[in-house]
Amino acid sequence: MHHFTYLNDSMFCEEVAVAEIAREVGTPFYLYSTATLTQHFKAFDSAFADIPHITCFAAKACSNIAILRLFGSLGGGTDIVSGGELFRARSAGVDPKRIVYSGVGKTAEEIRYALETGILMFNAESEQELNLIQAVAAEMNVMAPVSFRVNPDVDPKTHAYISTGLAKNKFGIPIESAIEVYRLAKQMANIEVVGVSCHIGSQLTQVAPFVESLAKVKLFIGMLKDAGITIAYLDLGGGLGIQYKDEEPPHPEAYGQAIKKELAGLDCTLILEPGRVIVGNAGVLITKVLYTKEGKKKFIIVDAGMNDLARPSLYDAHHSIQAVTNPGREKVVADVVGPICETGDFLAREKQVPAAVSDDLLAVMSAGAYGFSMSSNYNSRPRVAEVLVKHDQFHVIRAREEYETLIQGEMIPDFLKER
Ligand SMILES: *Cc1c(COP(=O)(O)O)cnc(C)c1O
């Protein structure tokens, strides 16, 4: 369910005509619907309404501070994976006690920053990281709340690049040996062991892998209990998939039911870290057709490229492409490509797309997750604007970058200034 619909053959985001926004802010731009974001957050959060839980939105999916603030205002928190995301969550006004810090490579500076902020907990991923957290916390004379991310060795049945819960993946501590790290941590003067976490992958379209990993984690929590270690938080990560094309992922309600059933008897607060399922279908990328080319193949050359939306190039991901006006128009099989000097620069490859000509606007659907947040300045392209619609108003939540921003921080050393 989303709020990008047609009225009189023209695409609207809630009550605003997309073409109108394009006239005002130019193209390309990311466009999000407040109603859709809110509805998706609530659908997910309410699936756990009857048990103690915190829904910590995974900032890396869509990290604009306006979006983080929206979820914060709905009672959610933030799952961060870097000091930069912590800065964003703080700038958005997210309650520190609703911030969890995941990721396999935290630095001493980032750990210090998180301890100063007073976050809910670290999800530590190795013994070496634990040692560093202990050292930094001792230096600051504070207690560090730590949970460990265990790797349950479960196949999430998703794209290899976004599988994280297999033994061969770099993430977490193997669940068989994790008890040792807990024992170690328990002895440490500045570590408070508060939880267990796991996150097995992204774009999961079945409930079974979640249940399988939860079953393993549950056994593990029992082992911890026997060892005299009780935990307050069980963090199940994110990973629930969305429909890009013909996938049929479970509804958050069904996901919640399955989790709660498996959870029965465990006495801890559940932490959830959904990203994609909340924002994926709440955002689109609007781009304008520059040229068309016709030879052996049809190409539609648009003003957005792989630097603006990396998913097609990176994962060969499918994004449906729709015409912003006259959606009933003829379809053609074509490549929709950007201006980047790479053959891998495409938004769609040999797909049925609207027959579009110069100056037509196209909407790249389901681009809210890992869209803007993965964008880059490759080919020295200023990053695009982000726009948030609420009812009949639109708000620019990130201005299009200027050329000046591109060289910010760059310097010509003196030896090159001579003559
Ligand atoms: C990426 C990530 C998430 C969010 O994943 P989605 O598939 O977007 O829900 C949650 N937790 C951790 C630790 C992650 O790395």
Image (cartoon, helix red, strand yellow):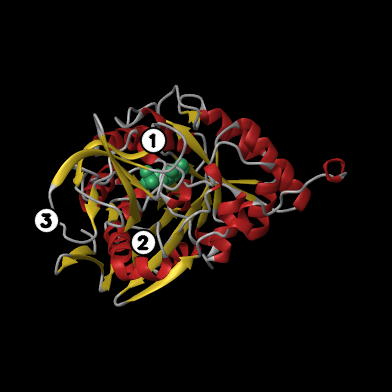
| Callout count | 3
Of callouts 2 and 1, the N-terminal one: 2
Image coordinates of residue 160 in percent, x first then y, are 37, 28
Mark 3–mark 1 contact, CB under 8 Å? no
Tell me the number on the disc at residue 328. Answer: 3
Q: Give the mark toward the camera: 3 or 1.
A: 3
| 289 sits left or right of 71 in the view | left
**Alpha carbons under labels 2 and 1: distance apart:** 21 Å
Residue at the extreme top of the image, as rendered: 168
Circle 1 sits in a helix, a strand or a loop, which is it?
Answer: helix
Please state which of residues 6 and 325 is positioned toward the viewer in this rendering: 325
Q: Callout 2: few (<14), some (14-19), or many (20+) C-alpha neighbours within 10 Å?
A: many
Residue 310 found in image quarter:
top left
**Alpha carbons under labels 3 and 1: distance apart:** 28 Å
Q: Residue at x 23, y 44 (%)?
A: 258
Please state which of residues 224 and 57 is positioned toward the viewer in this rendering: 57
User: Is any atom of residue 201 visible in this view?
Assistant: no
Residue 345 higher or lower than 394, as above or below: above
Q: Callout 3: few (<14), some (14-19), or many (20+) C-alpha neighbours within 10 Å?
A: few
Residue of label 1: 313
Q: Residue at x 30, y 53 (%)?
A: 358
Image coordinates of residue 123 in percent, x first then y, are 53, 43
Mark 3–mark 2 contact, CB under 8 Å? no
Amino acid at pointer 3: Gly
Of callouts 3 and 2, the N-terminal one: 2
Q: Residue at x 59, y 56 (%)?
A: 403
**Alpha carbons under labels 3 and 2: distance apart:** 22 Å
Tell me the number on the disc at residue 31. Answer: 2
Quadrant where the N terminus lies? bottom left
